[in-house]
Amino acid sequence: MITPMAGRGLAGIAVAAVAAVLLAGAAGSTPASRGHVRVYLLYGEQLVRVTRPGGSPAAVVRQLLRGPTRAEARRGIRTYVPRGTPLRRMTVTDGLATVDVGRRFISRRTRTRPSLLARLSQLVGTVTGVHGATKVQLLIDGEPVSGVFPGVPTESPITFRFLQTPNVGVPVPPSPRLKPPDKHVKQIQQRLIKLGYLLPGAADGRLGPVTEEGILAFQKWEGLDRTGSLNARTESRLAVAAHPVPISLGGAEKRAEVLLGRQVALLIVGNRVVRTIAVSSGKPSTPTPPGNYRVYAKIRRWWSTPFREWLPWAVPFVGGIAFHEYLNVPSYAASHGCVRQPHAVARWTYAFAEVGMPVKVIANS
């Protein structure tokens, strides 16, 4: 069973919103009661709390170590805690929870920065509140650990609030160095505007991030090499290309389609694509789940507690999965499940979206 949590600030709002959406799809869910515990798993870029049978403090951690059920995994819910991590000891005294787990918890095999931060957030979030615990002391094989979790001093007790609090500023994209206007570039821009890859007014003759994003989106839609730069084949195809059309017709007046195979998103009004944008969805190990969803919030500054990073201009549509801005948006699927967009288009998508707007994620198109 999956239940919403009461939270404060950005992280609390994010987790509560994720849990609320999950609850909507979990008919019959009820709050945790005696004989049940709550553990934290992940859905996209955010934590989500699920209910499990159990009662003792040790039972809480053991349920976390077991990870998602098969049904939850099919929905895209996952864990970053390494499978087979042993629990050595779990105690709670005067608000301090001491959790002693095996060295597998910091396994080198899966010891990437996001993975380490996510598994720590899962553990601390799960243990906080158990028998009044407000702080968590992590031990590995009976000893404190230091310098393992980036930016988190685990040699002494830590709080869940510490992990929920942003420790870096909102990333600012570098200012582009644009060349003087060029007549040929302007002609390319005019063609991209006509086809719906750029907005009217974008034809300034300067090859900058907005135009490069439009070129990349065009290349993805047309099945060309994904370079984001002009070349002979791209220009040749531009001359004869047709305006993209939605994969599914009808439905809501305003909607979006995310095409995982092509790594593009179509923003649609009626049955006309008003803009095609290049995106990077979930990588194979953390895929963006195909399905029919709806935008449930618009958050200008979303903070990912498990990964401790900003997700500006977020438009979440299922769990912790959202359209959002990101500085690194490769031409292939690379995210934790979200739909990354470059700075050049993220704010426009945010303005276009409406709460309740349908979002259809399509595997192949």
Image (cartoon, grey):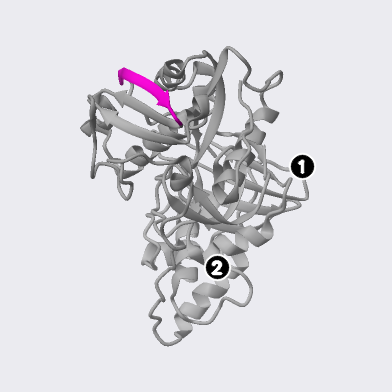
Q: CA distance from mark 1 to mark 2?
A: 26 Å
Residue 156 location (% of width, % of height): 31, 41
Q: Who's the residue at 59% across and 50% down the image?
A: 9
- Relative depth, front residue between 159 and 343: 159
> Residue 179 falls in which quadrant of the image?
bottom left
- Up/down of 97 relative to 197, above or below: above
Quadrant that contains the N terminus: top right
- Up/down of 234 relative to 44, above or below: below
> Residue 274 falls in which quadrant of the image?
bottom right
- Relative depth, front residue between 47 and 178: 47
> In the rendered structure, which segment of residues is drawn in magenta?
84-94
Quadrant that contains the C terminus: top right
User: Could you tell me the amino acid type at mark 2?
Assistant: Leu
Q: Which mark is on residue 251?
A: 1
Count the numbered circles shown.
Answer: 2
> Residue 86 falls in which quadrant of the image?
top left
Q: Which residue is mark 2?
A: 192
91 is within the stretch colored magenta: yes
Residue 353 location (% of width, % of height): 68, 55
Is residue 239 visible from the viewing direction of this image? no
- Up/down of 87 relative to 284, above or below: above
